[in-house]
Image (cartoon, rainbow, N blue to C red):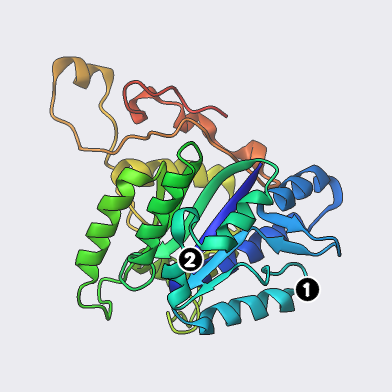
């Protein structure tokens, strides 16, 4: 089963490049993880007759600069590359997008999949190619593949962004994608920037050099022990905290006594998730029992499967 990504605009192409780099490095470790490595490559890459790995991706932008940079950097990695025919630039985007999203490039990528698992458009919502063309491409993909799973990865703009109409663009884009997508993964630039600078000690983070998401993909959870992470992640969810710093440990679900008596309690978030995937050498030290409490899960959802 394969996943085809659609990288839209400057942000989408930057994030997509980092994503494929991380997948390639992670899957290339080999050794006792041969089954995982093979499955990862088959899902996200197409192997050519020369044995090279081509990303299952379509690159779309209104100018070639960012796309050319992404393709050059991918080749320099020596592990994978983008296909030469996986590009839509300038006016050709609108002229060839059609019902397949990315025109002939999108059609080729889908046809190269033995079995299409889903589609993943990656874009920003502040304005430009991401929020404009990206929404249109998502609509085309939904029309062409109504039964395929659609995951939209969105980068939320900085609160002090340079686009004066970014708030309108973001709301309008999100309202449209809400009706088109099966799932939406939103990363807020402000939050990701704080994580990179405060928790990961990355000194120089600018949107002009690299999207903060790229740094997050590279340095994230490897710095945290699982035994501690699950407890903190649960409390971050419950208290609606975006970073580990500032967690409100006073927020908790109501006790049975409080619920039966109807006593006032803290407002807290509940989870829709029913699947937890834990990786790493400390996997058996993860305190997963804290995630099985039925009070943390919305009515109608089953407990977390481990």
Name the residue at 27% across, 42% down: 250
Q: Position of 208 compared to 80: left or right?
A: left
Q: Position of 255 compared to 93: left or right?
A: left
Query: Dot 2 lies on which element?
Result: helix
Q: Quadrant of residue 47?
A: bottom right
Give above or below for 104 relative to 255: below
Query: Dot 1 lies on which element?
Result: loop
Q: Quickly name the residue at label 2.
A: 96
Quadrant containing the N terminus in the rendered view: top right
Q: Position of 18 compared to 264: left or right?
A: right
Give yes or no for contact between labels 1 and 2 (Cβ–Cβ under 8 Å): no
Q: Quickly name the residue at label 1.
A: 78
Q: Position of residue 9 (x, y in %)?
A: 44, 72
Question: Which badge, 1 or 2, is on the more N-terminal residue?
Answer: 1
Name the residue at 63% across, 56% down: 109
Q: Report crowding for label 2: few under 14, some 14 to 19, many 20 or more residues within 10 A (C-alpha).
A: some
Q: Position of residue 184 (x, y in %)?
A: 39, 49
Name the residue at 13% across, 24% down: 263
In front of the other: 52 or 256: 52
Q: CA distance from mark 1 to mark 2?
A: 31 Å
Name the residue at 35% across, 30% down: 296
Give above or below for 232 relative to 123: above
Q: Position of residue 195 (x, y in %)?
A: 43, 65
């Amino acid at each position: 089963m394969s996943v085809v990504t659609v990288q839209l605009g400057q942000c989408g192409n930057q994030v997509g490049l980092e994503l494929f780099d991380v997948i390639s490095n992670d899957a290339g470790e080999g050794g006792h993880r041969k089954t995982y490595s093979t499955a990862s490559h088959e899902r996200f890459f197409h192997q050519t007759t020369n044995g090279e790995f081509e990303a299952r991706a379509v690159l779309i932008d209104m100018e070639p600069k960012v796309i050319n940079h992404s393709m050059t950097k991918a080749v320099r990695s020596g592990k994978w590359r983008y296909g030469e025919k996986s590009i839509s630039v300038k006016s050709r985007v609108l002229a060839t997008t059609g019902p397949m999203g990315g025109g002939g490039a999108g059609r080729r990528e889908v046809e190269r999949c033995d079995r299409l698992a889903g589609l993943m458009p990656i874009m920003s919502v502040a304005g430009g190619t991401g929020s404009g063309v990206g929404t249109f491409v998502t609509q085309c993909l939904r029309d062409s593949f109504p039964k395929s799973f659609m995951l939209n990865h969105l980068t939320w703009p900085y609160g002090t962004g340079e686009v004066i109409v970014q708030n309108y663009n973001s709301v309008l884009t999100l309202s449209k994608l809400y009706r088109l997508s099966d799932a939406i993964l939103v990363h807020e630039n402000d939050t990701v920037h704080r994580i990179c600078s405060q928790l990961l000690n990355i000194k120089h983070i600018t949107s002009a050099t690299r999207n903060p998401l790229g740094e997050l993909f590279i340095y994230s959870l490897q710095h945290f022990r699982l035994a501690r992470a699950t407890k903190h992640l649960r409390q971050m969810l419950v208290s609606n905290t975006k970073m580990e710093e500032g967690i409100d440990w006073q927020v908790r679900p109501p006790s049975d006594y409080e619920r039966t008596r109807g006593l006032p309690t803290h407002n807290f978030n509940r989870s829709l998730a029913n699947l937890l995937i834990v990786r790493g050498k400390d996997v058996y030290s993860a305190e997963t029992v804290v995630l099985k409490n039925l009070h943390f899960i919305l009515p109608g959802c089953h407990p977390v499967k481990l």
